[in-house]
Amino acid sequence: MLKVDNLTFEVNEEGRKRCLVNHISFEVKDGEMLVITGPNGGGKSTLAKVLAGIEEANEGRIFLDEEDISGYDIDHRANAGIGYAFQQPPRFKGMTVKKMLSLAAGKELTEAESCKLLSAVGLCSADYLNRQMDGTLSGGEMKRLEIATVLAKPHKVSIFDEPEAGIDLWSFQNLIHVFEKMYEKIRGSILIISHQERILNMADKILYIKDGSVAAYGAKDQILPQLLKNQDSSTCKVLTDKLADGKKEVPVA
């Protein structure tokens, strides 16, 4: 189980402090999926980076299975069981896909094991095993490979930052199937940052963040109907004015 208590992250901009994550608290139990959504620039990706240990919180605590991991860096958090898929996956010239998957798994994978991971994210293994993780891969290919690296090793918490970004419709449909399978088999927890209704519909809980703060948090059946009332053509964009104005007391599941 992941428990986040009063998490705060600030940056200094031209001598002024700006709060990107403002006293956020939530928990995700084993076997649950939490989808984090909200307006662009609201602090969702920053929150994910703080959870993964890429950024260091100014205040608050993070507990993983009741162990306080607040002081752990990114490597120690990964060893503790937190997996993180970047919104913009890094590229590594000179490293093959197969090598990257083995590094992610923490062991040398067989060709069959590597092929299974690639197939799970909709890539033809024969075309990718020996490809370089460099600029020859498209953004959509890199996104799917990044997800495969998270799948390569069991995690207590798997974090995916806008996994649908930069991929085509066919890839998105396949991505949904990947998450559905993960959800069926998980023993840990899944956190997904997304605007997509199909992903929101998979959630047990939804956390809506606006301007770095929690605007609403609770069970999907409580939060999603309010989101859908105010969606535009591409994203569940905003909650009702009532929620946005701070009258946001939705019971926590």
Image (spheres, rainbow, N blue to C red):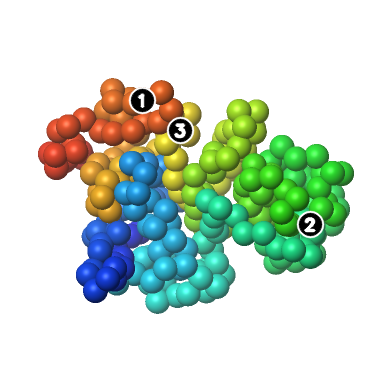
> In the rendered image, which quarter contains the C terminus?
top left
Task: Give the residue displayed 60% in from the left and 55% down from the top.
Answer: 89
Q: Residues within 10 Å of mark 1 (few under 14, many from 20)?
A: few
Mark 2 vs 3, N-terminal side: 2
Front tag of 2 and 3: 2
Task: Give the residue displayed 73% in from the left and 57% down from the top.
Answer: 134
Q: Residues within 10 Å of mark 3 (few under 14, many from 20)?
A: some
Asked if the residue at tag 1 contacts the one at tag 2, i.e. Cβ–Cβ closer than 8 Å, the answer is no
- Kindly identify which numbered label has been placed on residue 127: none
Instruction: Left or right? Give the position of 34 relative to 137.
Output: left
- The secondary element bearing badge 3 is classed as loop
**What's the residue type where badge 2 is placed?**
Gln
Instruction: Left or right? Give the position of 86 relative to 100.
Output: left
Q: Is residue 222 above or below residue 152?
A: above
| Residue with the mark numbered 3 | 196
| Residue with the mark numbered 2 | 132
Task: Give the residue displayed 67% in from the left and 59% down from the top.
Answer: 91
Q: CA distance from mark 1 to mark 3?
A: 11 Å
Counting from the top left corner in percent of width and height, residue 158 is at 52, 53
| Residue with the mark numbered 1 | 232
Task: Give the residue displayed 52% in from the left and 51% down from the top.
Answer: 87
- The secondary element bearing badge 2 is classed as strand
Counting from the top left corner in percent of width and height, residue 26 is at 31, 53
- Which of the 4 quarters of the picture holds residue 16? bottom left
- The secondary element bearing badge 1 is classed as loop
> In the rendered image, which quarter contains the N terminus?
bottom left
